[in-house]
Amino acid sequence: MRINDVSIDDTFAEAFGMRGARVIITARTLDWARTAALEMTGFATSVIACKCEAAVERELAPSDTPDSRPGVSVLLFTMDSDSLPRRLVERIGQTVLTCPTTTAFDGLPDAPDRILVGKPLRVFGDGFQSSKIIAGRRYWRIPVMEGEFLIEESFGKVKGVGGGNFLILAEHDEAALDAAEAAVRAMRGMPGVILPFPGGIVRSGSKVGSKRYRNMIATTNDAFAPTLRAITDTALPDGVNAVLEIVLDGVDFTAIAAAMRAGITAACRPGVRGITAGNYGGKLGPHHFHLHRILNGDLTPLPPAPQPAPSAPGTPAPA
Amino acid sequence: MSDTITLTLRSPVERIVEAECLVPSALASLGERDIAHLPLWEGPNQMRVGDLFDVRGERSAVLRIAGDLSLVDAVGAGMTGGELTVDGTVGRYVATRMSGGVVRIRGDAGYGAGLEMSGGVLDIHGNAGDRLGAARLGASRGMTGGEIIVRGAAGNEVGARMRRGTIVCGQAGARAAQAMIAGNVIILGALGDDPGPDNKRGSIVALGGARVPHGYRYACTYRPPHVALTLALLRRRYALPVTDAQITGRYRRYSGDLAELGKGEILAWMTDA
């Protein structure tokens, strides 16, 4: 398959199950909502060391938020159910509660699985907090020096998908970056998807484990590192001198597939030799995003691949 | 089976009639004849629905009643679901102890509308009498859930002893939110004397100003986020005349009643903020 003379590998991106929540942050201005959202999603690129993956999903007009103020939608994912509320409480408590004028709402109100976030945070109010039930949902009013911080008691939890990806194989670094930026522009704001890495782009894709260091759970993806072409089992075609990766997490398979389709199409630009995807032979996860299938418009999931044997706790998803 | 059951009053009602049977869920499985046979009470005298109303439609949870029902009490009492619309005025105790569904009154409602209601929506397009959403006299709890919207004026003691839920009125009489335990009473216009006596943890939101009673003490002027959320939702759901300035504006917060817990509040909108 070729798009704009760029070769699309007949391969698949391999992704894994995650647990996710959506937080709607509103504030007096979009700038303040954005500020809180960026703080909340800081240092959340990969579960390899950040304990969660999070990013801004999209910005919201006042007409799209519960309190008619400007807002930002954030998605946060963890590898397991237990750590999701912990990460949310930590991050909202330190970055949204502390930020002027903000309010935090559940962005998945219809999700049947609920996790308590506002409830544990309420004790910051030292007994002066109070609750309100508004339209059937309980909120906590936490008095702060500026006035009050309002947060929903519980947030919805969904089984999401983490680690959707594709790699842009380019003739040189500028072409790779131009293509990756174009892909990010095409994918940003698509519903149900985040790109958790800096600017949505990864330059240091990793492989599982290490060839040399026993304790390393992820190390450089040497097969795609151009400087190692001569001394390793390279996967780089001739003429490729720079590779950038796009990693996607989403609330479901279809959201990621739709974003990958838009991103890959946008990345097929001059200077790009090929598009491929990271997979680990089916060992990593049950969700397989076949590039040709997606680009032909089929965004539905295949029947799940057999689950791999459980790995050691904390085994990360390679970027 | 019909889309709607319609009851049309044949002639004016001259004495008070109790009509607890006029509830959508009670009619949802009945045919026209069975509906016409349901009992109504005029004092100690039993009569039938068919004696007062023309019945059209059957087996529906959507009930429409047309006519002046100002002497018909307890319409929609104990309602658990479905939809009830009254094209006219209703008497006392409409939707009392209601726990679900939607009641729309296109005219006025009498004393005790939504009394001890626990869920659902009561939307009154005209005025409401005293003790809207309140407790029965002597009872410990009034409304415990749901939403009451009165687009006109409500009488005295709106939300007395209410425990949870939201009441919105165009105007309210004296002693609104008397002995309120918790919940929200929102007054879009004029608020009567002595609001919130013995209020424990309830919120009284006064968009048309309030004469704050002695049991309350000024705390601060700020933008309460729960008021913004509540007003935005109410405007979207019920097309209430709430302005952006009221949603995003500043409110003077008074804590009280200090003779009780002092965790209640009167939030008075600052028109010039």
Image: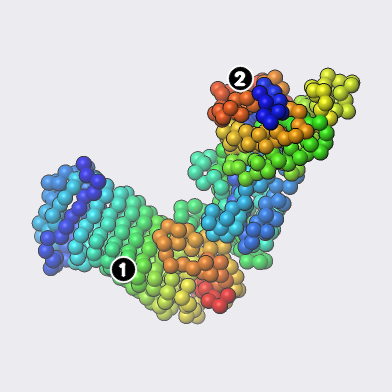
Closer to us: B195 or A239: A239
Q: Is residue B188 above or below residue A120?
A: below
What mark, if any, has residue B126 been given in the picture? 1
> Is the N terminus of chain A in the top left, top right, bottom left or bottom right quadrant?
top right
x, y percent for residue B5: 21, 50
**Mark 1 secondary-structure assignment:** loop
x, y percent for residue B208: 46, 75
Residue at image coords 54%, 45%: A108
Q: Is residue B213 above or below residue A286?
A: below
Quadrant position of residue A176? top right
Judging from the image, mark 1 belongs to the subunit labelled: B
Q: According to the image, label 2 marks what residue?
A: A306
Q: Is residue A140 left or right of residue A3?
A: left
Closer to us: A149 or A76: A76
Q: Is residue A217 left or right of residue B139?
A: right
Closer to us: A233 or A10: A10
| Gap between marks 2 and 1 measured at Cα | 63 Å
x, y percent for residue A55: 68, 45
